Every structure is written in C-alpha cells, then in structure tokens.
Amino acid sequence: MTSELERRLAADVEGEVAFDDYTRHLFSRDASMYSIRPLGVVFPRGAGDVAAVVAAARDHDVPVVPRGAGTSLAGQTVGPGIVLDLSRHLNRILELDPETRTARVELGVVQDQLNRAAAPHGLMFGPDTSTSNRATLGGMIGNNSAGSGSVRYGMTIDHVRELDVVLSDATTAHFAPVDEAELARRAAAPTLAGALYRELPKIVEENRDAIAKGFPEFWRRATGYRLDRLADPTPFDLAKFVVGAEGTLVVGTSALVDLVPKPKHTVIAVGHFASTPGAIAATEDALACDPAAVELMDRTILDLSRQKIEYASLGSILEGDPDALLFVSFTGDDLDELVSRLRQLTAAWRRHGHGYHTLEAVTPQQKASLLKVRKSSLGLLMAASVGARRPLAFVEDTAVDPKHLPEYTTKFKEILDRHEMEAGFYGHCSVGCLHIRPFVDLTEPGGVEKMRAVAEEVKDLVTAYGGVNSSEHGDGLARSEFNREIFGDELYEAMRQVKRLFDPRGTLNPGKIVDAPPMTDNLRDPALPEPGPLRTKLSFEVVGGMRAAADRCMNIGLCRKQESGAMCPSYMATLKEEDSTRGRANALVKALSEPDPKAALGDERLHEVLDLCLMCKACKSECPLGVDMAKLKSESLAHHHDVHGVPVRSRVFGSIRTLNRLGAATAPLSNLPGRLRPVRRLMERYLGITANRPLPRFERRHLGAWFRTRGSAGKPAPRGEIVFLADSFTTYTEPAIGRAAVELLERAGYAVRMVTRGCCGRSSLSKGLVDDARRKAAALVGQLAETDAPIVGCEPSCVLTLRDETLSMLPDDAAAREVAGRVRQIEEVLAEAIDDGRLELDPGAWPSGRRVLFHGHCHQKAEVGTAATVGLLRRIPGADVVELDAGCCGMAGSFGFEAEHYDVSMSVGSDRLFPAVRAEPAETVIAATGVSCRQQIAHGTTRQARHPLELVMAAVRG
C-alpha cells in the first residue's frame, strides 16, 4: 500500500514527496516528548496539493497530519500517515492592507515575517509568541497561540477573520462570519461544507446547557473545540471555530488575519526578587498599572543565561544575585506616560516591600538584552537537560486567574516536592499562566508513572481554581486524554459529534482533542534503543557519547529562524527541515541508534543530510542546548571515509597549509592557473573546485619570510613574550594582516615569538580527516608548550581551534589543556595597550572618524563573541562602528569553493550580508576578521573588506 500511495502522491502533487527512512524519522518528532513515525512527508506548493494529499490519504485510509514549524509542545504535529509540511512553500504574504489593518497570508508564513512586512505601516500581528522567529501562522491558528501580550491582545482566535481550508473529503471551503440568510443558503448545499452549516447549529442548540457550564471559567483557553464561540450571539463563524482544533477538523491553507497598531515605545521594569513566590506576589501591583505583559523568570533560567555567550550581557545589568525576575512591559505611543507608569510601579513595589531593586529599561540599549533573554526561557531551561533527564512539557500550560496565582503556585510546588521533582518556573504572570516544566527521566524505572501522577494531580488542582489545563500550548497527545473529565461527559460527547461531522473517517490528525490515547503512549525517550557500540575519534564523553550529543536536541526549532543570528545558514537558504541543525541532529540520532552505528554513519542518505552543514559552529552558541553540529559532522565524515574512502578533494583541502606554502614559494607563477579559464574548468571537472570563484593569490614574501628578515631583535619588550600563531591562510595569501598584528604587538611592548611551522588541524578536521588533524594538533601543541606566554592570532578559526577542537582530539593531553588556557584574543591584548597608553591612535589618521561596518567570524561568535573586536574598532578616534547581524557569510572555508555548494554559498551570502554591504556608501570601511568572510564579501559585492588589525595599525600615531 505504501508504494502505491507514494506513486499516487508523486503523480498528483506538484511539491516534493518523501517516503525515505530519514525524512520519516525527522518528521516523527516535534518539540514535545512524543515520537510517531509517519508513512511519508509531502511538501505542498498550494491548496491543490493539500487537497490531493487529503484525497489520496482518504482513499488509502491513512491519516493526514498538518505541520508548520514543528514546535508544538504537546505532540500536535506528530502522527501516523502523511505529514503535510506547509512551511517550506506555502509562505507568501498574499496581501497586506494598512487601511483595513488586515493581511492575507498562506499558513506557512512565519510570525516575524508578517511583522516585518507590517512594521512600515505601523502595524503588527497581536499575539506575540516566544517562538515568533519560526512559528508559522498555520501553527498558531491550529494551536490558538497567545504569548506574552495576551492580557492586551488576546489569543490567535481573536485575530482570525477568514480561512481557506481543505475539508476531510478533499473539497475546499472558505470560512468567514455569515449572517442568518447566508447560513441558510450555505446549509442547503449537498456537500460536506453544507452539512457543517446544517448540523453544527443543531449540536450547539442541543448542548447549550453543557456549553455554558462545561468550559473552564478562565478565558485563556487553548483546549477542546470552541462550541462556546458558536453559542455566542454573534454571526456564525467557522473561521474562528476551527482555530485551536489542531488540524483535526480541517487543513488550513490561507487566512485573512487582523493586524493591530504597533506601539511606538516599550519600557520595561525588571523587578529583582529574593524568591519566586515573592516575584509572583508582586504581580497584583504590576497589573494595577495596566501593563502590556508581566513575565516571570526564575533562578534556574537566570543561571543558565549567564553560561551562554548569546545572553551574557544580561548579567552585567542586573543588581546583585536575584532568585527571580519579573519583567513588566508598558507599551504605547506616549513615552512620557509610559515612563510615568513604570515609575508608579517602582514606587508601589517599594511601598509594599516587593523585591529589593527595580531596573528601569527605557533606551534600546537597556532593553536589548532583556528582550532577548526573555524570549529564550524555554531554550535556556532545556539546556539544563542531562542525558534523558529533561524538563518535559506535560503540566507547563495551566492558567488560573492571576489573583489565585500565588496560592496556586504554592500548591503546585507542593505537588512537585511530594514527587521529588525539580522544575523551572517562567511564563506570563499577567494572565496566570506559568510554564512549569519538571525535570523527568522517562527511561528510569517509575519515571513514566511519576510523570502521569503529577499530571493528574495538577489537572485536579487547576480545575479546583477554575483554571485551564491547556492555556496556549494546546491539548495534543499530552492533555487530550483528560478532556472528558475536564469538560464533562455531555460537552465531551458534543465535541466527539463535531469531530465525526467534520471528519467521519478520522482522516485528519486523529487522536488529538477527542478519542486520544493515554498520555504515556508514544513517548520518545523510552522507545529509543540503547546505542550500539561505536569508538569515536573525537571525545564526546562530557555529554555521554556521540548519540547523546545529537540527542540533546529537543526540537524547539530555533535553528529554523531566518532573519537573525547565524544558525542555521543552510536552512535559511533552502527552508528544508533536513538542512536545519534540528534535522541533522535527529538524522544522527537515527543512525546512531542502529545496531551497527559505524555502518549507519556511512549511509549516503545521512551523508546527504549532513552535506550542507557549513560547520560554522553557530549552533554551538545559538542553539540553547549547545548542539555542536560541526563536531558531529567531523566525526560522521571520518566514519563515512572509513566506509567509502577519502575523496581526493578532501585530501587537497586538508593539506591546505602545505599547498599554500608551495604556492607562496612559486609565486607569482602559482597564481596563473587561477586566472586561466581552461585550467579552472579542469579543476572543477576533476577536483570539484568551482570555476566561478576566484582563487586566493599567493604572496612570495609571506609572513614567515618577512618576520625572519626584519631584524626585530633588541627592541624593548617590557610586557614580555607573546606567541603569535601564523595561520595557514593569511600567512601565505594576506601577509599584510600578520605584519600589522606583529607591529602592533611590538609597539604595545611585547616580544613576539612567531610559530610558523605546523597547523592547528582545522582544515583537516573540516573534511573529516580526524586522525590527520590530531597529528597536526599534537605537533602544534608540542611547539606551543615550549613557552608559557599568551597565545594570539589573527584568524579566529585557527586560534580558537586550540580552545575547542584540540581538546576533543587530545582529551587526555595535559599540555593541550594548558595551551588552551593561554589562548587570548589579540583584540583584547591591543585594547588593553590602547587603554594603558602604550598604543596611541591618531585622530587624523585615515580610519579615524570613518563609518566601519563590521562582520564577525562565525567561530568567533560561537566561541568568544565579537565584543572584543567591536571594542577595539571603537577605540579608533571618531569611528562609527556598526556590527552586522548578517549571519554566516556562506563561504565557510572550503565549502564555498566546492562546485556543488557554490550556489548555496552565494545564497547564504545574498540573504543579509551582501545587501547590507552594498547598501553602504563607498566611503564606509568594511571590516571582517575571517579570511573566508573577506573572500566572500569581495566576490559577492566587489567591496574590499579589511581585517580590523589593519585599520588599527593605520590609525596608530607615528
């Protein structure tokens, strides 16, 4: 049957159809604790494709599971049958009308994408989810999402005007409010849509009493079918009715949604509290000041934020060591009035003894780090996972009237204490919704039973307070089982009638909301087999082995963001799940769960999934769980080579230092082949090195030759010795950068010891030549261990290898750890010299007073951040330094030279980097720390990018 279904879909559907094992595994998971393997996945290009899939599935009696970004926390987007990924192609904003404040969108449009389009008109989409940079409008509609601003803007259901849908019989329908005459007209149609308009009013009328009494009292509901909306004395509206139905009634394809005015200003009060209950108790005062949002963050998440480079700036603005923070946001167009309310709250907290300090954030600089970390609470909490002990989503979505919140959370904590569970507390105090996620290991004996016991007790507790078991994350597989008890038999049976009316054959996402399996079925972790034996070449012991390193991914999907940061550049270029960090991590989990994981790592389909990873390492810092895909890919490539042999091109790129040294020795003759088109075509044909990209130009007087003959002996060096690592790239192709570095260090009072022999192994490692890289790393460590001086360099990927990959290659080498501890950023060293007066910069020098557009190297961002480089550039007198948030440049060392990767490389650069550089006037100075970044900028924009050290050297007085 499966092959027949696959053939039919391939014939009927314009979009891609995938039934291979890896794709099915990737779509067996979402951000919940569940996993169900589908038969196949379809990526529809339009409503016609969606209808064709539903028709084929209906004929073959298999379910259809609609899916957006796959970030659902309750298991809504996993299921058997055909998964419909609406995010890859159905992502157009069809119309945006500022006059009516509406937008018509396909349901794969991402929330931030819509907000960017609406912003020039002073508008935005009201519900503000923490996943706004990857959550699709379809997912928000299916889930009835809300977010931090729901106290003001309500939920998604309040912003949907019209929906275009595919029904369970594969017909299409347009849902919108209808008056009585139109209702009667539609009800007369002899179609499934007609039956909906005929029978739903009867269901409502027959169950009016149960509808009035059965729904939870609190308004913030993302649970059940919204018969209460149809019972209202408002026009009959199926568009709103199916919001929150989790794809169980219809498959939406496009929607007309309301937009709201975007406030011109936001100010934030950040209360510091000695305890979480103390912060919750301060909510009442905050609500009295009419805030836009009141958000809680407890110590668990605060401490985790301090460990991540991405959020390190938060710690520098906090006062003392708070146990909890309360973020209270005020939004509007009158800044003075907002500041007045902020001060009113500060005074009220002081008067009532709430907290010990209130940070008032008014300027963009003050707010930036606060807003960034506030939206990242889930990811930060997930980072505390150890093995299979994870903070799981099963009681994280309850909500009660905020007046009950202090007492409710106290009793909630008592339940957790009784079961000896820890949890992180964060969420929306303004609407009584705290996302409390207990740490549970479902693979331990009794772990599943303990989870269920807590779920049942919490369900009873929230019911006792008139609250809601699912307030914005939906029912899914985690909570649907309890819906009969929550709504009562009569209302629950009415909901079952609704499901049978819309979907009599159970085609659409069965097992959610009604007729659900037990919440303990289909759990991901207990079903995962023990990993087979695998001897790795890199050390993964810190995280429990290679599979554990990949399985840290909890599928929250931050790697699917498109307009900020560097993770994940290949996903930004292709919008394919398998090209995201999440997709690759899940593919590796599958391979490493096979009986023979070494053989599985040689699988060509796995190799295809990993192929477009640029090894930029952005995931190491931007992924809240620190999934290091670059390291995982190096290890995987090594095992692939063991099975299939090492390609010639990989050996060539792995030997780049030797090739560059030979190129410099034979320059300028060695530069001729790079300019001869026939030679370039031969290189592309036989080595796979693209003819479209210029090759680096070798310099005969390379850095080592210059250093040996310059006669620096005898120069005063009051600061002692410093080691300069002459990398394999700038040494032979851009020696002027190394010369600038050496001269700056000497002017700063250092005796420079240059290490020109050997290689860090970075290039070998990137091609999976781990044994070769280890030998190189060991030799280099031996040289560097001869001195105890600080170690610096000008190519981030090389010098930072000593702090990261070298330790994975040489985990038991004490000298490697000692060397890693001496690595410093050269920018830090030079900034100290400028501040001490050892280096003086000239206000009249050509870089002074110029605008400098700076692009940081991905490895630098991942390992140490770019603050030191930006700080050094800003010490140039009068320099206006702007750091780009342009992600990865797309070059990634050898990646951009490889013929099959050239188009993706240029697509990544064209996303944000090239447009930003081209937009700058000619007098703007472009700066970049990475050799690959400078090559890509030159190729993609024809603008020369300089290393920051060159600019500082040009600005030095005298």
Image (cartoon, rainbow, N blue to C red):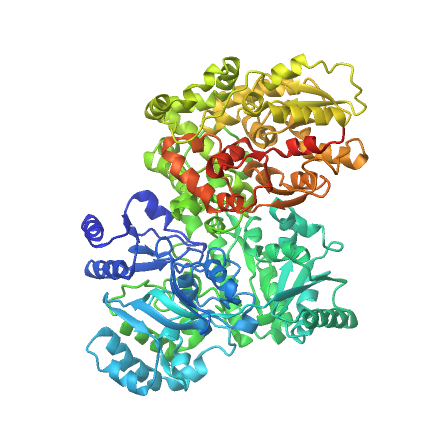
The x and y percentages for residue 882 are 62, 46
Residue at figure coordinates x 77%, y 62% from the top left: 356
Q: Where in the figure is residue 725, as x and y percent of width and height?
A: 63, 23
* Quarter of the figure that contains the C terminus: top right
Q: Is residue 445 left or right of residue 593?
A: right
Residue visible at 46% across and 23% down in the picture: 654
Is 655 above or below relative to 503? Answer: above
Does 170 sit left or right of 724 as displayed?
A: left
Instruction: Report how many numbered discs are placed on residues in the image.
Output: 0
- Image-quadrant location for residue 93: bottom left
32 with respect to 18 (left or right): right
Asked whether residue 73 is in view, the answer is: no
Residue 731 position by quadrant:
top right
Q: Position of residue 926 (x, y in %)?
A: 58, 39
The x and y percentages for residue 896 are: 44, 33
> At x 32% / y 68%, what residue is drawn?
164
Q: Nearer the viewer, residue 314 or 831?
A: 831
